[in-house]
Amino acid sequence: MDGIHDMGGMHGFGKVEPEKDEPVFHAPWEGRTLALNRAMGYTGIWTIDQTRAGIERLPADVYLTSSYYKKWETRLENMIVDLGLAGRDELEAGHALRPGKPLKRKLTVADVPNTLSRGTFARPAQAPARFKAGDKVRTKNIHPPTHTRLPRYARDKVGVVEAIRGCHVYPDTVAIGQGENPQWLYTVLFDGRELWGDATDPTLKVSIEAFEPYLEPA
Amino acid sequence: MTHDHDHEHDHDHGSELSEMQLRVRALETVLAEKGYIDPAALDAIIEAYETKVGPHTGARVVAKAWSDPAFRQALLADASKAVASFGLLNRVGDHLLAVENTPKQHNMIVCTLCSCYPWEVLGLPPVWYKSAPYRSRAVNDPRGVLADFGVKLPADTQIRVWDSTAETRFIVLPMRPAGTEGWSEERLAALVTRDCMIGTGLPKDPKEAA
């Protein structure tokens, strides 16, 4: 979706302000929020792309004015309510008013070390790769109202396939419950001037990780 | 949250803090009473990110790549496999890529769409990495972003920005600073900052670190 989350190339957000000796969490609730998201993710009720889509669906003003973990917390509440795992009345009461639903699994202390490494998103291919390294490609001019990982600034642009990264879960379908639908993934490299015009720093090159359905031959 | 570093924070920090504490406590209580989560597992996750997972791991990887040409090659060929073989982590997820800075090319990592970041080797991302200023400007004004970090590169160095739009994750392999010949991996690792593995910084000056 063409949401506020898709920030590449926007003007007006000001300087980057690194914080010296930044703590891992700025308040205990941030750590709890991260851990709650991880623990609920472990139950298998949603995928990483569904959680990203959950953030993207936040209203633009909420997105821009909420801290990172506040977005995570709001998203988690919304998804739990949407899936019928708890009611708003229960969140307001601060206690369960009804029994929980059975879930596939529950994160225990013993499982935690294994959840600290990422899973794999590689899947068997449905067809041979359409492109190879060195191929010129044009990204499609798509504007789906649902989750996609093709950023706006890199749509309808000509680039070169730099590498094939394997065949991966396709975010655009898995996020809307239409299955993993594995697709070839490519690193596609663009000249900065193709993305931003002739006035751009000539030394700039930008790459995206592009799924095959985003690309056509150029 | 007494800092004004994060444009995304609500202006009234104090009230957000207490409101969020209450909301998160309510959410956790409901989810625990429903039987979905075990609060002790939450404690273990938080402890891991506060004490175990962090950029010290990436720094060890970089120092080894600087010291051991065979490891450097293996790292650039398949970073997931190379980092796993190093034995610092129980397991390493797939799709980790190491990208090497050279005198000709400087690499910088961003996630313009959300906050993708190589957690296993760098820990949780800093607030600035997830902020609108970084995510908006890294892809069209990386030299301006570098200036925000006090870094200036030669005008003819090519800047290569990697937007983490899929499940591939990137770590920058910075250039080994001159004047570190014969240094142990441990000494070298102390020069490797988190930011130089994202591409918004350079390794520490060996003279200052010595």
Image (tube, coloured by chain):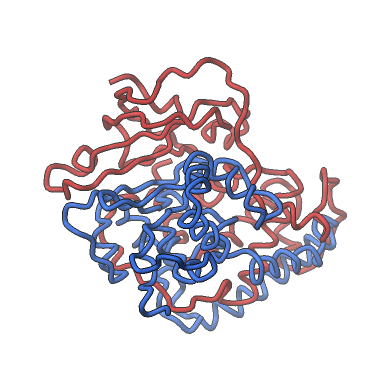
Chain colours: A red, B blue
Outermost residue toward the left in this view: A199
In this orientation, which residue lies closer to the viewer: A139 or B190? B190
- Judging depth in this view, the residue of A123 and A59 nearest the camera is A123
Residue at x 78%, y 67% (from the top left corner): B29
Q: Which of B10 and B83 is in front in this view?
A: B83
x then y, percent, for residue B68: 50, 52
In the rendered structure, the answer to whether residue A73 lies left or right of residue B147 reads right
Q: Determine whether, in the image, residue B26 is placed left or right of residue A148.
A: right
Quadrant of the frame with the C terminus of chain A: top left
Position above or below: B17 against A69? below
* Residue B21 in picture, x, y percent from top left: 65, 75
Q: Which of B70 and B111 is in front in this view?
A: B70
Q: Residue furthest front?
A: B182
- Estimate the x, y position of residue A154 in percent, counting from the top left: 32, 38
> Residue at the top extreme?
A127
What is the total number of numbered labels drawn onto the structure image? Answer: 0
Would you say B140 lies left or right of B169 here? left
User: Which image quarter holds the N terminus of chain A?
Assistant: top left
> Residue A128, relative to residue B9: is it above or below?
above
Image x and y of residue A13, in percent: 30, 63
Query: Residue at 38% of width from left, 73% of height from top?
Result: B206
Name the residue at 16% across, 56% down: B155
Residue, x 61% and y 62% (percent of image)?
A: A73
